[in-house]
Amino acid sequence: MISAIGNNVPESFLSLSQSKTGIGKINHLTTRYKDEFLAGEIKLSNQELADLVKDNNPALNRNSYIAMLAAKEAVINSGIDTNDGLRTGVISSTTVAGMSKTELYYKELFEKDEHLSVLDTHDCGDSTERIADYLGNVDYVTTISTACSSAANAIMLGCRMIKHGQLDRVVVGGVDALSKFTFNGFNTLMILDREWCKPFDENRKGLNLGEGAAFVVIEGEHALNLRKGKALAEVVGYANTNDAYHQTASSPEGYGATLAIQQALTMSGLTPSHIDYINMHGTGTPNNDLSESFATKAIFGNQVPKFSSTKAFTGHTLAAAASIEAVISVLSLQNSMIFPNLNFTTAITETGLVPETTLVHTPLNTILSNSFGFGGNCSSLIFKKA
Amino acid sequence: MTKAYINGIGCISPQNSIDSEWFFDTINPAKGDYFDAIEPSYKEFIAPNLLRRMGRAIKMGVAAGNIAIQQAGIEKVNAIITGTGLGCFEDSERFLLAILNNDEQFLTPTSFIQSTHNTVGSQIALIMKCHDYNFTYVHRGFSFESTIQDALMLFEEGKETILVGGIEEHTPNFVVLNRRAHKFQELQSNTPIWKSTTPGIQMSEGTAFFVLNKTKTDKSLASVDGIQTLYKPKTSADILNKLNGFLKLHNLTLADIDVTLMGFSDDVNFDQKLQELLPSIEKESVAACYKHVCGEYHTASAFAMWTATKLIEKQMLPKVLAISDKAPSKIKHVLIINQYLGINYSFTLLSQC
């Protein structure tokens, strides 16, 4: 995992356990608003990323660099060997793909040939194929784009392909590098907070954009047993639904979200009382947090488990959000820690829900993680301690 | 093995495929080195208040989806799965140029909102009030293939009716820029597309949607029996080897395949492995092609699947598609071997049902 809170999992864990946000002044993104807004940027320049990847291929862009780094870290950490003859897949997800580079050269392309190659790396499949080639011996690749729920769907698809016997193991996750395109897009929607975002706070004003990539290796039992490996966590439930309310806004009552949580619970065979902690989508926008709060109350009633949004650490990393939060959920399970919902002071009047605001040490067995996106895409995942 | 029965189809392409009667009788030539889709009058398919804001990819997708749903005679689906390589490129480009031309000022959100790749799938969900499974695949020449793979798994998981579709649009700027990058050539009148000796494709666009059903009904036109993707196969022998394995899974050999639709794209570099494969295909089956008719794009395999469905329905291989001299005596099994940029290969098997 790479994001504003660290270039790898150990660094990220340190930031999380020290309640240290990665959101700050904009340094790398070129924008006229760089002094007016905050963002969760990865603290490395493109050249520094290239050095880490050890590849100076000019066709690579920020999206590919961070995807390759995070995917490689996941594979090394898992201990799998992609040369052992088992079927390995890469399922990635992204929303703006190569846009961070396209936008630098697009106008110039009409006059000069020099950067025409950005046309070949603009699309969403590019970074996925870069990951596959970087890892080597990959049998299957595909890419998903369902806005801010993308990586949750990549995780879900990976689990399903293993269940259906189509793959033995799969590297799944998401990536989005910060771009002027997304920054201005969210700015025109007027859902960016100029200060640190305050998920679930009555006075929340919007989200902070972030960037990042995170991948997890999912193995079927057969592959895991063959190499006598040990799992960090198990995916026991997942669901994908659609709010079908509005292209960008969530329904006030969180209908799609409620369905997703309900269906994920049903699949896991668990009841709401089994959920020890919820890693919320919690972007910090007035609309999302209220809608998600209502969905949470619809499922859990007056017994809402401990919950927090970790987006005040990383910023909203769009397609990568769900896989970053999957890694954070696994860290929570491994270390019996709930990472705090930063910047919260006052509960939302309509729902009164209060997140965890300091680091909590408590045994955790089961975590629900939500991700919702434009287009009404709602996805929920349930992770269980292995 | 689970099959997907095709109960409705809708296709917008550079040809008159929007007309359900059209069967390759009249062929529109490329506009030199590229194709534009022939768009219908959308008023029949989309409410005017929605139509006004929609970008072209969204209009083409929603209309083709609508045609497929009408043909299937259904009102509800259990899943909507779309595939697109570049998504709503027109809206993406419009928002990008607005940012660049106005130094990030005076922007409106409409084109940003519509630029996300899942816009077509979510618009259809909104129109149909479908709260069920909704997925968008965006992987180059696997974008449409992934929708079929997913649908086949969903049928095993208990879903009954699924709408899948491939969507691609280009813009005038994108055509100009890719031409400058030397990616295009005009179709050669004296060299058929499967014998190209020069690099260059005819870039194109289009959408094709399918209503798939888990069980056969009186509406069923054909079945999709299986699909497999191949990422960067090293040699044509690898492809043939994988193909034989794929057919074996379905208790078939190449000799059982009445028509093999091959994704020749007119670019000698990308087509090389298919050119090498062609003699083996022609020996056992009847070879045909489609990209001289629909052009090349990330989801051209959706047009190929639409074509395969039509071949089975009409029990005839139009001359314009044929590579082999011999005609099929019947059309029970159709195999599609698609390739994109010589990197993404796929096999799709359709059968009469």
Image (spheres, coloured by chain):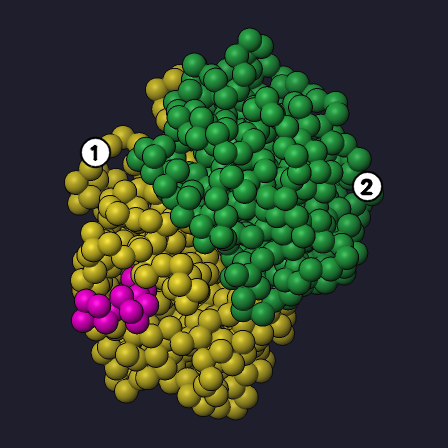
Chain colours: A yellow, B green
Q: Mark 2 belongs to which subunit?
A: B
**Residue displayed at 54% across by 16% down:** B192
**Residue displayed at 56% across by 52% down:** B225
Q: CA distance from mark 1 to mark 2?
A: 51 Å
Instruction: Tell me if residue B38 comes above or below residue B196 in the rendering.
Output: below
- The three-letter code of the residue at mark 2 reads Lys
Instruction: Tell me if residue B129 comes above or below residue B138 in the rendering.
Output: below
**Residue displayed at 69% across by 60% down:** B216
- The three-letter code of the residue at mark 1 reads Asn
Q: Which mark is residue B284?
A: none
Q: Is residue A102 left or right of residue B70?
A: left
Q: Quadrant of the C terminus of chain A?
A: bottom left
Instruction: Tell me if residue B315 comes above or below residue A377 in the rendering.
Output: above
Secondary element at image label 2 = helix
Q: Residues within 10 Å of mark 1 (few under 14, many from 20)?
A: few
Image coords of residue A335 (percent x, y): 23, 78
Q: Which residue is mark 1?
A: A56
Residue A276 found in image quarter: bottom left
Q: Could you tell me how many numbered marks the image carries?
A: 2
Q: Is residue A282 magenta?
A: no
Q: Mark 1 belongs to which subunit?
A: A
Image coords of residue B44 (percent x, y): 82, 43
**From where the camera sits, is residue B189 visible?**
yes
Q: Nearer the viewer, residue A147 or B83?
A: B83
Q: Which mark is residue B43?
A: 2
Q: Nearer the viewer, residue A146 or A179?
A: A146
The furthest residue to the top = B190
* Range shown magenta: A215-229
**From where the camera sits, is residue B106 visible?**
no
Image coords of residue A314 (percent x, y): 34, 61
Image coords of residue B223 (percent x, y): 63, 52
